[in-house]
Image: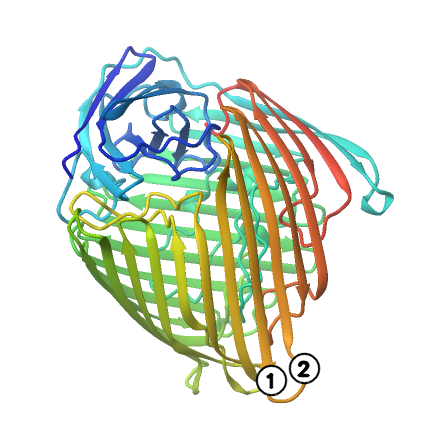
Amino acid sequence: MNEATTARIATDGRFLLVRFDAVQRERVFQTQRTNDVGQGTDDNVWVDVWPSGPTGFEYQFIATPNGTHYQSSTENATYAPIWESYGAVRDGGYTVTMKIPLGVMRGAQSSTSWRVQFARYIRATGQQAVWSFDVAQTSADDPARAGTMSIAPSKLKRRQPRIAVYGLGEIASAGAAGNTWRMGLDLSVPIAEQSSFYATFHPDFSNVELDQQTISPTVFPRAFIEVRPFFTQGANNFNNFYCNFCNGFTALYTPAIPTPRSGYAVEGKSGPFSFTGFDSVGNGREDLASGIVYTSPDTRWNASFNRVTVNLPGFMDNENVAGLFYNDLKHVIVYANYGNDSGTNVLQGDRAQYYDSGATWSSQTFSIWGGVHRIGSSFNPADAFILKSGVNGWGIYANKIWPFASNARLAAISFGGALTRNHAGDGPFNQTNNKLDLDILTRSAVDLNLTSGSSYLLLSNGVFTPVSQNGIGLTYHSGLQTNNPVSFDAHGPSATPATMSYNTGRFGNGRLDTWIRSSTMRVGDRGTLTIQLDDTAQRFAAGGPNVQWFESAAYSYQIDRDSSLGIGARRVVGNAPVPNGGGNCSGVCSNLSLAYHTRLRHSEIYIAYGDPNALITVPQAIFKLILYAGSDKGT
């Protein structure tokens, strides 16, 4: 890569001031117009900072050539402070400037030696360049390989509390509980420079940020992403267990916790330790969880512990999980995890344990990893997610990447394979998987993927049945980065991909064919249209087929830097393949949704109809106003 990037950084004691000057021969992509929408679509530059060193909170600030920006932090999954960014395209490149308040970063008040990394992504070629580089590096955001900068003492006072008061009004049919309104409160109060107490009272969990509808074939339960603010703050201290062969195990799966009446929590960092503890209080139910993570100063060692307790009338469950992880920061990772479960439904305490261990060897172009686990038949914690209890198994995976020169038409070819086996106790295998995967990525962001193999599952009726899907997939504008000395794993998928894939295989008592087709395209300077059509057809030797399809269309319009509008219509029709653990619709399920959002300096406004997460639209319109006082959102 011979397109220079110059980064400059300074501070006036109140703000972090960053400037990037980028030389670029290729077309400069700058399509996004609304902050926090469409990350990965455009060229971008970013700065990572660790004010308290590599074991402290990480803060990342990203901006595109026209100044549209994004941010994230390990402090909070909903980290969204107010900050400024500007961009201008010129002949032969572009310039981006950032003005970031020091007060939105924990540790910035006292630390004078920070870890810092500067990086850049070129959309046209998929290349990623970093400032502080190591030949063994596989991530641009690795704190162990970031540089160090000295910074003058901050002029800031102690962090301020954050209070968010919301008012929610609903207009709904009588069958959807009728018209109603309610108010609630979320707050966060600093108790030390890097620690906070936070709470929620009568929380509003009507969030509709994620569209999780799908008809992709699966014989296992589906896991959903948590979007509720009370559970996302401090979430980084739960499930912090390295695992190569987990059997879908998640020690704390907060979507299993119903909406609480109120919640109380504390989270933060102290030296090499980070911690979170919360108490979610509902109607006749209480869920308590605590997590603590130790990271050694050189980031090579990591130890984690989670405890989760569920209390209901006549029911109690206690889960403890601990893990140890070592990384030599070059090639080798070794880990071990242990858990146990006790309570009302645990009838055999000696079979309520979880064991898991494994190792990884990796470089920038080759990796091999594997693991073994043993899960007792009585290990099934109430607030955890696990595909199947009572299994022992092992798995091994390998992948090789062949990168090409920057002037070649091909960017990279990768080839990998996987073998996994599970069996019940000391009995026969009840789950097997054999897979080969070939992926070809071109410089023009065309990605061709071929898979082949077989999968089998022992059903509850004792039948060892195939559940295989093998085929071909083609994606344009994949958003993947190439793997050369200045490129790493994907920084984010493209927001305008076009994908088509076909998979087939023996599935249950028949053959299952699956098509997935989707395309996202620009409509004018500020609009985006996404169309998707998926279908599954399972045919049997005798009897009629199971046919199901999913069709959707969504349009989004970026009004300005802080406002956007989205409209979506989707429908699921038909019967899912058998066996099926996904909970898909049977018959016809249709959904219509509309959402408007605007972000002001001390408030947010949402206007919505329907819910894109639901299979069927509930006839209700929602108006929501959030007022913020004190610190910014998510800080």
Quadrant that contains the C terminus: top left
Q: Who's the residue at 38% across and 48% down the image?
A: 477
Q: Viewer-proximal residue, 341 or 565?
A: 565
Q: Report x, y in % for residue 537.
A: 58, 73
Amino acid type of the residue that numbered disc 2 sits on in the rendered structure? Gly
Q: Which residue is mark 1?
A: 540
Question: What color scheme is it?
Answer: rainbow
**Left/right of residue 180 with respect to residue 631 in the rendered view:** right
Q: For the residue carrying disc 1, how many other residues have a C-alpha within 10 Å: few (<14), some (14-19), or many (20+)?
A: some
Residue 103: numbered disc: none
Under circle 2, the secondary element is loop
Q: Who's the residue at 52% across and 24% down the image?
A: 562
Q: Viewer-proximal residue, 243 or 38?
A: 38
**Left/right of residue 69 with respect to residue 538 in the rendered view:** left
Quadrant that contains the N terminus: top left
Q: Which residue is mark 2?
A: 544
Image label count: 2
Under circle 1, the secondary element is strand
Q: Report x, y in % for residue 394.
A: 34, 74
Q: Viewer-proximal residue, 170 or 183?
A: 170
Q: Is residue 508 visible?
A: no
Labels 1 and 2 touching (C-beta < 8 A): yes
Q: Viewer-proximal residue, 164 or 531?
A: 531
Relative height, residue 21 to residue 511 (above, below): above
Q: Residue furthest right?
A: 174
Amino acid type of the residue that numbered disc 1 sits on in the rendered structure? Phe
> Image quadrant of residue 541?
bottom right
